[in-house]
Image (cartoon, grey):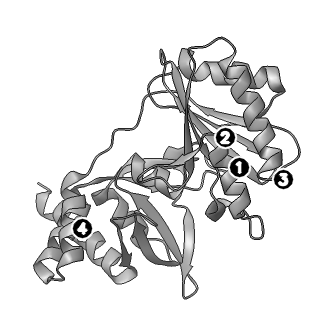
């Protein structure tokens, strides 16, 4: 998504595109200074969902005060299960609804976030990513309740069979498909990569949905094992159901993938 700087009229037109173009996974990230909001909609829809930047995703020292949170709530934002951000559902049935929404959000950038500068938007128009990994999630939930070697082995097996959403670093890469894994943290000085079981888990991590690419587990682990500075892989970081695989586990899974390739070769 390439950011565009827009005036109020341009912002109205941009929001209109969320319900007139693309598909059911349309998303717009609106940024001003250190603050942002995320708007989602679908082609043919008559409403938009707005997520306001939560304190945890703002720069240090820019977190929201209780008064600022109350101001967001006064503007119609509420907490929804499974989402880190306060959310507002906006109906577009009335004439001028988009203009009113733009005016409201521009005001909140100032009143709540103290953000100045240009309004920039970045689009992602198209179909909603429907990647699902119900067997993997079920295996992780079971392992979280009872630590058992056989249950851990089941999680490993499901990880190899899963299609995961891998965060990637697109800087200097020719698109997400060619980008290397993104470093999302560090473990005793070693790099930590991150992947997700589904879009909802990724959106919980960051509602802006940073660049990612779908990848099969049997492709992912050999690739990760070749990263000389990899310390671990986080699955659904910050989510309700997830976990961390350390380098030795990543290496073990990579070797299992290679053994399968060798045994299936003619």
Quarter occupied by the C terminus: bottom left
Spot occupied by residue 46 in the image (x, y as percentages of width and height)? 51, 18
Spot occupied by residue 110 in the image (x, y as percentages of width and height)? 83, 46
- State the SS at label 3: loop
Q: Which sits earlier in the primary sequence, circle 4 or circle 3?
A: 3
- State the SS at label 4: helix
**Closest to the observer: 125 or 41?**
41
Spot occupied by residue 57 in the image (x, y as percentages of width and height)? 64, 60
Label number found at residue 114 = 3
The span from disc 1 to disc 4 (Cα, nearest Å) is 38 Å
Residue at 17 percent of width and 63 percent of height: 260
Label number found at residue 168 = none
The span from disc 3 to disc 2 (Cα, nearest Å) is 16 Å
- Do labels 4 and 3 touch, CB within 8 Å? no
Q: Is residue 189 above or below residue 134?
A: below
Which residue has dot 2 on it? 75
Classify mark 2: residues with Cα within 10 Å, few (<14), some (14-19) or many (20+).
Answer: few
Q: Which sits earlier in the primary sequence, circle 1 or circle 4?
A: 1
Which residue has dot 1 on it? 71
Using residue 116 as the reference point, say whether residue 207 is left or right of it.
Answer: left
Label number found at residue 140 = 4
Write down the quadrant of residue 166 in the picture: bottom left
Select label 4 or label 3 by which is in front. Answer: 3
Using residue 62 as the reference point, say whether residue 191 is left or right of it.
Answer: left
- State the SS at label 2: loop
């Amino acid at each position: 998504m390439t950011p565009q700087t827009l005036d109020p009229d341009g912002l109205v037109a941009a929001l209109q595109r969320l319900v007139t173009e693309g598909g059911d996974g349309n998303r717009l990230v609106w940024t001003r200074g250190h603050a942002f909001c995320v708007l989602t909609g679908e082609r043919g829809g008559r409403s938009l969902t707005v997520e306001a930047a939560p304190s945890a995703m703002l720069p240090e020292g820019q977190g929201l005060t209780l008064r600022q949170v109350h101001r967001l709530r006064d503007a119609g934002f509420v907490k929804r299960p499974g989402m880190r951000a306060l959310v507002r559902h906006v109906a577009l049935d009335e004439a001028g609804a988009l203009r009113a929404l733009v005016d409201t959000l521009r005001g909140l950038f100032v009143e709540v976030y103290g953000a100045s500068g240009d309004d920039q938007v970045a689009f992602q128009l198209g179909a909603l990513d429907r990647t699902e990994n119900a067997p993997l999630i079920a295996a992780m939930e079971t392992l979280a309740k009872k630590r058992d070697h056989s249950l851990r082995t089941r999680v490993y097996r499901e990880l190899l069979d899963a299609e995961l959403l891998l965060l990637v670093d697109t800087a200097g890469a020719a698109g997400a498909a060619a980008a290397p894994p993104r470093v999302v943290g560090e473990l005793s000085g070693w790099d930590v990569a991150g992947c997700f079981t589904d879009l909802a888990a990724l959106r919980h991590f960051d509602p802006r949905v940073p660049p990612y690419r779908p990848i099969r587990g049997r492709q992912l682990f050999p690739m990760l094992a070749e990263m000389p500075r990899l310390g671990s892989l986080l699955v659904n970081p910050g989510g309700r159901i997830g976990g961390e695989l350390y380098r030795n586990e990543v290496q073990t899974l990579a070797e299992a993938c290679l053994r399968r390739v060798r045994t299936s070769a003619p």
